[in-house]
Image: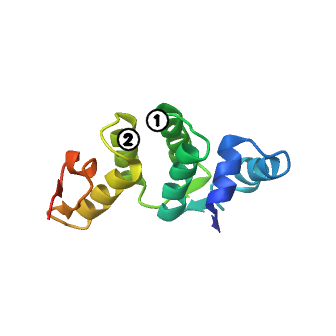
Amino acid sequence: MIGLDTNVLVRYLAEDDPQQSPKAADIIERRLTEDNPGFVGIVAMVETVRVLDRAYGLDVREIAAAIERMLQADTLVVEDEQEVFAAMIVFKERQGSFADALIGALGARAGCSQTLTFDQRALRLPGFERP
């Protein structure tokens, strides 16, 4: 397995750099295999979503499609895949941010009865409460 950093994922998804994007595509589309997949850690996933949103200005549907693309790739192993998928659905339906939804999903999986927050948007999500 080969770990993938945020910048490799962003270059692959955004196809915006004439030197780095083809290298990222080569890694993900040719070098990685089901027997030797790429690992997308939870931090890299959250950072990728944040960069696509803030730096590239992609809309929610485009970012959700990018997450789905990573989740469906046979050559990628996404850490906490089920929670990432659940967070992507919440994000796609504009119920909350991807990061907040992921925090809630990971907490629920860990057995948390609730997630405490001061964030008004996060309070709209199930399982979040004000302290």
- Locate residue 88, reporting x and y percent: 40, 44
Rendered view: 120 above or below 130: above
User: Which residue is painted at 21% across and 45% down in the image?
Assistant: 124
Q: At label 1, which amino acid type do we have?
A: Val
- Image-based side of 27 in relation to 45, left or right: right
- Locate residue 7, reporting x and y percent: 67, 57
**Badge 2: how crowded within 10 Å, few (<14), some, or many (20+)?**
many
Q: Is residue 14 visible?
A: yes
- Looking at the picture, tell me which residue is in the foreground, 63 or 50: 50
- Image-based side of 3 in relation to 45, left or right: right
- Looking at the picture, tell me which residue is in the foreground, 42 or 39: 42
- Image-based side of 114 in relation to 91, left or right: left
User: Which residue is painted at 73% across and 41% down in the image?
Assistant: 15
Identify the residue under disc 1: 60
Question: Which secondary structure, mark 1?
Answer: helix
- Quarter placement of the N terminus: bottom right
User: Which residue is painted at 51% across and 44% down in the image?
Assistant: 67
Question: Which secondary structure, mark 2?
Answer: helix
- Locate residue 129, reporting x and y percent: 15, 57
Rendered view: 69 above or below 20: above
Q: Is residue 73 visible?
A: no
Q: How is the image coloured?
A: rainbow
Tell me the distance, in whole angstroms, between the alpha carbons under discs 1 and 2: 7 Å
Is the residue under label 2 in contact with that under label 1 (CB below 8 Å)? yes
Q: Residue reaching furthest right? A: 19
Q: At label 2, which amino acid type do we have?
A: Phe
- Quarter placement of the C terminus: bottom left
- Locate residue 112, reporting x and y percent: 19, 66
Disc number placed over residue 91 in the picture, else none: 2
**Badge 1: how crowded within 10 Å, few (<14), some, or many (20+)?**
some
- Image-based side of 77 in relation to 25, left or right: left
